[in-house]
């Protein structure tokens, strides 16, 4: 299923502050997007896709926002662009994010995507988009499965 | 080079340009009770044994203090245990908001690169520092390595000419700028604030300005140090005369009116006349944006010898214990309490929607905070207007959104 939301979806709407203070990360998925789309957490299934407009994840630095989305089973977030802290957090915890610029993807569209090439294909409208290429360090972090694994292996940052 | 480029270049040891990817040493890292628990978990998972520098890693209990439930109390315990084991500084419950205590206790200084696991970390741009907010895992990585990877941001310059009118504050100015640039107007970029309107500003007012860089999506925002007065000597960093800016905005702010941001976004900003008269239930002054002594004094100036409207509640969370003591010693707190305010523990207070004053359904809040997203204060069925402390106080007095200029 493809869920489509608008511009400037802030982290308070992704996961309200009152739920963030926990280390039981599975509880975050129960409240993900609660104030934006109350039915989302009940309906979402593994492999679903969130598509949004510009500046997705603006506001608080809470890493609980991408964690909540990842915990819910969402496979990828595709947006016109992302707020910078959210974008870093998503890569760091291993939630794939694709920044594709202006798009016309509609709710329920059938989408194929390739994280390696960054290609997003809206099969319903037969339209293709290409995601902005990540800096090499982010590709390295993603390839390791996140920043924890990257640093466990490398001990410090490496420029390749 | 711009101020940001000069600070980064000084840290990495070579000239930098926007778009360069650098791995820079940092001068300090900080996390709070919202972000530290996950960061400490990530730190351990990375194989972290000791932090890179015991003097440069700081933990602050401020987002949910005192803890409203056992779950959060246990997270606080976890942070205390880590701080003890690592022998690093932890600011206890009631010491104040992270950004306030970092500045008060000189953990961040002009020219520094500072990384905070809180989105309002750019506040230190008031001090001529390059400060960025990150999430928990990035913070853990910086605690471990003492480094951060950064893409050198493009800079934009906001020039404000003219002097603000009496009764119009730094908050009104930054709300106006957020309204003009919008919530995504500075995404990934560094802002430089320059011009007459900033030159006479106190450190506290400059912190209010730099604080809301987060509400424009900026990576950092630095106030030009011209006119900056600190209680210690420092070497100011100015931009080079040939510095390159992606964009320069220029405003004449000498006629600026008090500003209000309507729900549910900090960039829905208009002159107060657009919302004046809206009935309010709840007024709040505090936060990293506006909980400092000059903010409490501005409220006290409006409320001296008066009582707030019956049926309105008025909460004040001083930005730090030291702010609270100063406001006690100079009589400010007495004026506010006699006017009907409740003073709560220094910290983030009700701004983060966890406790200490969640609004009810359909209630309207006027707040001196920096965010009014839906559900921000803990209830998605309430509405939050943002304004300067003087406007919040004037509104508490009348029970509706009111310009402080209309209070005699």
Image: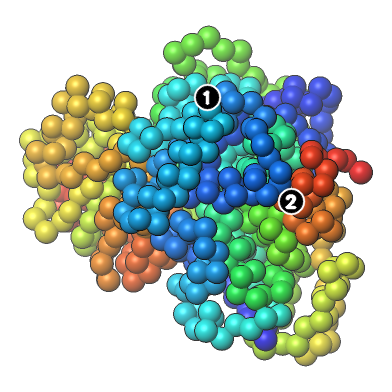
Say how the picture is coloured.
rainbow
Task: Give the x, y percent position of residue B157.
Answer: 63, 36
Is B248 in front, or is B75? B75
Where is residue B93, by image quadrant?
top left
Given residues B107 and B360, the one toward you in this image is B107
Is residue A43 visible to the viewer in this orientation of the structure? Answer: yes
The residue sitting at 42% across, 45% down in the picture is B76
Q: Which structural element holds mark 1?
A: loop
Residue B250: x and y in percent read: 58, 38
Q: Secondary structure at mark 2?
A: helix
Task: Please name whichever residue, B63 or B230, is drawn nearer the observer in this view of the structure.
Answer: B63
Callout 1: residue from which chain?
A: B
Q: Chain of mark 2?
A: A
Does mark 1 fall on the same chain as mark 2?
Answer: no
User: For residue A147, which numbered disc appears in the image?
Assistant: 2
Q: Position of residue B314 (x, y in %)?
A: 20, 49
Query: Disc 2, disc 1: CB below 8 Å?
Result: no
Q: Can you tell which mark lies on residue B221? A: none
Label 2, label 1: how far apart the Cα atoms are: 26 Å
Crowding at mark 1 (Cα within 10 Å: few <14, some 14-19, many 20+): some
At a point 37% along the width and 50% down the height, the residue shown is: B73
Q: Residue, x 64% and y 69% (percent of image)?
A: A70
Instruction: Specify the label residue B107 is tagged with.
Output: 1
Residue B275 against residue B143 in the figure, above or below: below
Q: Is residue B174 left or right of residue A46?
A: left
């Amino acid at each position: 299923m493809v869920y489509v939301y608008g511009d400037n979806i802030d982290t308070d709407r992704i996961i309200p502050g009152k739920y963030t203070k926990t280390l039981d990360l599975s509880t975050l998925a129960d409240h993900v997007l609660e104030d934006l789309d109350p039915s989302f957490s009940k309906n979402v299934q593994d492999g679903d896709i969130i598509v949004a407009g510009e500046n997705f994840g603006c506001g608080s630095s809470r890493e609980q926002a991408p964690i909540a989305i990842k915990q819910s089973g969402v496979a990828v977030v595709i947006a016109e662009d992302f707020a910078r802290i959210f974008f870093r957090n998503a890569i760091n915890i291993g939630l794939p994010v694709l920044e594709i610029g202006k798009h016309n993807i509609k709710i329920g569209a059938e989408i194929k995507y390739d994280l390696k090439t960054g290609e997003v294909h809206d099969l319903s409208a037969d339209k293709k988009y290409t995601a902005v290429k990540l800096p090499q360090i982010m590709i390295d972090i993603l390839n390791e499965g996140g920043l924890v694994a990257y640093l466990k292996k490398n001990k410090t940052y490496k420029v390749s | 080079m711009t101020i940001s480029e000069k600070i980064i270049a000084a840290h990495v040891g070579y000239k930098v340009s926007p778009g360069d990817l650098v791995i820079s040493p940092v001068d300090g890292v900080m996390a709070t009770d919202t972000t530290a628990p996950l960061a400490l978990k990530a730190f351990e998972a990375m194989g972290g044994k000791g932090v890179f520098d015991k003097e440069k890693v700081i933990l602050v209990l401020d987002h949910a203090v005192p803890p409203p439930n056992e779950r959060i109390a246990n997270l606080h315990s976890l942070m205390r245990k880590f701080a003890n084991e690592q022998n690093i500084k932890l600011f206890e419950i009631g010491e104040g908001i992270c950004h306030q205590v970092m500045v008060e206790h000189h953990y961040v200084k002009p020219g520094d690169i500072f990384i905070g696991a809180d989105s309002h970390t750019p506040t230190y741009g008031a001090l001529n520092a390059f400060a960025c907010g990150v999430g928990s895992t990035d913070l853990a990585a910086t605690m471990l390595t003492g480094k951060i990877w950064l893409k050198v941001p493009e800079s934009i310059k906001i020039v404000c000419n003219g002097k603000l009118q009496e009764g119009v504050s730094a908050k009104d100015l930054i709300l106006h700028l957020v309204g003009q640039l919008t919530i995504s107007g500075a995404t990934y970029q560094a802002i430089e604030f320059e011009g007459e309107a900033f030159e006479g500003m106190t450190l506290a007012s400059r912190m209010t300005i730099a604080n809301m860089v987060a509400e424009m999506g900026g990576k950092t925002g630095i106030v030009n140090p011209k006119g900056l007065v600190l209680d210690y000597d420092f070497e100011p960093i100015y931009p080079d005369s040939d510095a390159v800016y992606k964009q320069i905005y220029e405003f004449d702010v000498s006629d600026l009116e008090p500003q209000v941001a309507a729900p549910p976004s900090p960039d829905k900003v208009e002159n107060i006349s657009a919302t004046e008269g809206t009935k309010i239930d709840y007024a709040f002054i505090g936060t990293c944006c506006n909980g400092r002594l000059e903010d409490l004094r501005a409220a006290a100036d409006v409320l001296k010898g008066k009582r707030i409207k019956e049926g309105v509640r008025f909460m004040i969370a001083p930005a730090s214990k030291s702010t609270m003591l100063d406001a006690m010693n100079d009589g400010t707190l007495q004026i506010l309490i006699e006017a009907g305010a409740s003073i709560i523990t220094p910290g983030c207070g009700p701004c983060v929607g966890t406790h200490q004053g969640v609004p009810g359904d359909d209630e309207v809040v006027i707040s001196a905070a920096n965010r009014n997203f839906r559900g921000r204060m803990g209830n998605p069925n309430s509405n939050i207007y943002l304004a300067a402390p003087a406007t919040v106080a004037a509104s508490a007095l009348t029970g509706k959104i009111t310009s402080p200029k209309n209070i005699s």
